[in-house]
Amino acid sequence: MSTDDPERRPEPVAGQTVQHGTGVNSNRAFPTNNYPHNLDPFVLFERFYIDPDKGFPMHPHKGFEIVSYMIDGGMEHEDSLGVSHTAYENEAMRITTGGGIEHSEFPADGDACNGLQLWVNLPREKKEIDADYEDADQTDLPTEEQDGATVTTVVGDGSPLSLHTDMQYLDVRVTDSWTWTVPDGWAGFLYGVAGEGTVDGDDFAEGNVFPTTNGDEFAVETDDALRLVAVAGEPHDEPIRQQGPFVF
């Protein structure tokens, strides 16, 4: 299924299990066999599950930005900038890899952890900028009670995390109904974290992704509870060339 055709209505698709690092299992939203595309400006998105004896030893990255957001447990981050930080549930980290950085990621406190990781392409003129790092704890991220949903802004208005791409990243806990609004010309996706419901009438549950490349408004509803993240950004309109840990 592709949403590249502007005449085709977006529909949810299932994520795909991938394994990497020292045996880390992830549910990848895209690119996958079900959705074999990037979503300019987004390179990839997945939910990772790291057992206590697994993780990602020191490895290089360049050419993009990383947003990691923890769902359960803690993840230890160390990098070649000298940063050492542990992010716990509902806390986030942003890494600008730029011209190059090395980092490692392992579960903290001897326990398993899981979270979400988003790769955001850097525009071509910024591919070689200096690497940078920023983090935010739960109290740093603004949370708003809306009719039918509680919305936490991970990236966007009020969040201390900033990227070199105009974008918004929301953690949304829907208890009744909520409308996802994507600006005209932006691309984005919904990803199911827990629970179940519908998006524009189609079934939507944990591990599902709902991609769009055209902007619009989409109705999210649940009879019980549905937690999802809603991510949207302005495309760079440049090719995304990923080779393992590098994006050219």
Image: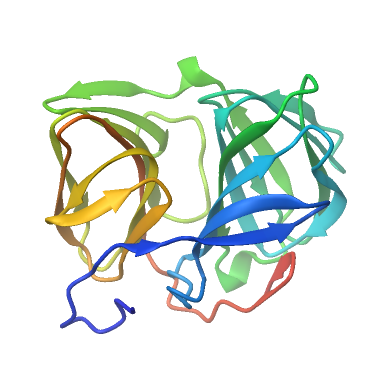
Task: Indicate left or right for 238 with 245 as reference.
Answer: left
Residue under the point 11% across and 26% down: 147
**Residue 149 point in image, percent of width and height:** 20, 28
Q: Is residue 192 left or right of residue 24?
A: left
Q: Is 18 left, or right, of 46 in this rendering?
A: right
Answer with left or right where residue 39 lies relative to residue 248. left
Quadrant occupied by the N terminus: bottom left
- Colour setup of the view: rainbow
The location of residue 205, given as percent across then percent down, is: 32, 47
Is 243 placed above or below 58 here? below
Q: Quadrant of the C terminus?
A: bottom right
| Along the line of sight, the residue nearer the viewer: 166 or 181 | 181
Q: Nearer the viewer, residue 241 or 159?
A: 241
Residue 103 x %, y %: 82, 45
Q: Position of residue 40 (x, y in %)?
A: 44, 70
- Report the label total: 0
* Most foreground residue, 201 or 67: 201
Instruction: Give the residue at x 74% y 62%.
Output: 62
Answer above or below: position of 8 versus 107.
below
Residue at the location (20% across, 81% down)?
6
In the depicted view, which residue is nearer to us: 167 or 175? 175
Residue 136 falls in image quadrant: top right
Point 64% across, 61% down: residue? 18
